[in-house]
Image (cartoon, rainbow, N blue to C red):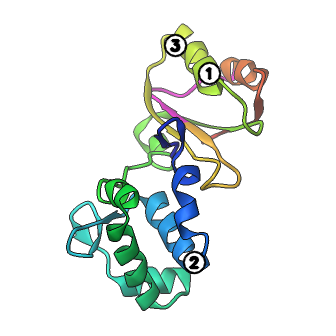
Amino acid sequence: MLNFVGGRLMWGKIEHYFDEYPVRKLIAKTLLRYGLRVSEDMKIKAGEIEVPYTKIAKALNVDRRVVKETVAMILKTPELRDIYMNLEPTVHMKYVGKHVGYGVIEIEPEPRAIGILAKIAQKIAEREINIVQVVAEDPELYPEAILTIITEKPIPGDLINELSKLEGVKRISIY
């Protein structure tokens, strides 16, 4: 997801806190990617569901103590605390959309292309198709950042061709 804080991409604004701790950086980045919140009582939560340190440690192949140290560091650093205590996981309908009759398109933009979402949304709106969800991955968190657009009905083939010709669009996939 594309997240902005103070006019910059979120990860780019906070990653420097973890520069001296590569494993903590990996953990912090993972928490951010999945919207896992840090609570006042040093718990990691997906919504209100607690995620044990051991599960995160196992998934990342790190020691659970480093997960705990990362949480402590986040809570001691006001800027990190404000961000990580307010994260929420979000449903991503990419793989579900087709099962409920929605259209799902994935756009790989040219690196640092500006205005892709606006251009694509305009073209879709011109066809009177409603957009249900947009997920724009943060290029600082996802090396191959993708823009996923879920629409109330499948996108017609001629519109896909039109979208693929827009400046800044590298590739389009349909699900």
* SS for dot 1: helix
Count neighbours of disc 3 (C-alpha within 10 A) and say few if under 14, some if 14 to 19, many if 20 or more: few
Taking the spot 56% from the left edge, 39% from the top edge, the residue there is: 148
Report the residue marked by disc 3: 125
**Quadrant location of the C terminus?**
top right
* SS for dot 2: loop
Q: Describe residue 117's horizontal placement relative to residue 70 as left or right.
A: right
Magenta region: which residues? 149-157
Report the residue marked by disc 1: 120
Report the residue marked by disc 2: 21
The image shows residue 124, relative to residue 34, as above or below, that is above
Q: Which of 146 and 114 is in front in this view?
A: 114
- State the image coordinates of residue 130 (x, y, percent, origin top left): 44, 20
Amino acid beneath label 2:
Tyr
Taking the spot 60% from the left edge, 75% from the top edge, the residue there is: 20
The answer to which of marks 3 and 2 sits earlier in the sequence is 2
Q: Nearer the viewer, mark 3 or mark 2?
A: 2
The answer to which of marks 3 and 1 sits earlier in the sequence is 1
Q: Nearer the viewer, mark 1 or mark 2?
A: 2
Amino acid beneath label 1:
Ile
Residue 146 sits inside the magenta stretch: no
Taking the spot 48% from the left edge, 17% from the top edge, the residue there is: 129
The answer to which of marks 1 and 2 sits earlier in the sequence is 2
Amino acid beneath label 3:
Ala
Cα separation, mark 3 vs mark 2, equals: 46 Å
Count neighbours of disc 1 (C-alpha within 10 A) and say few if under 14, some if 14 to 19, many if 20 or more: many
- State the image coordinates of residue 88 (x, y, percent, origin top left): 32, 53
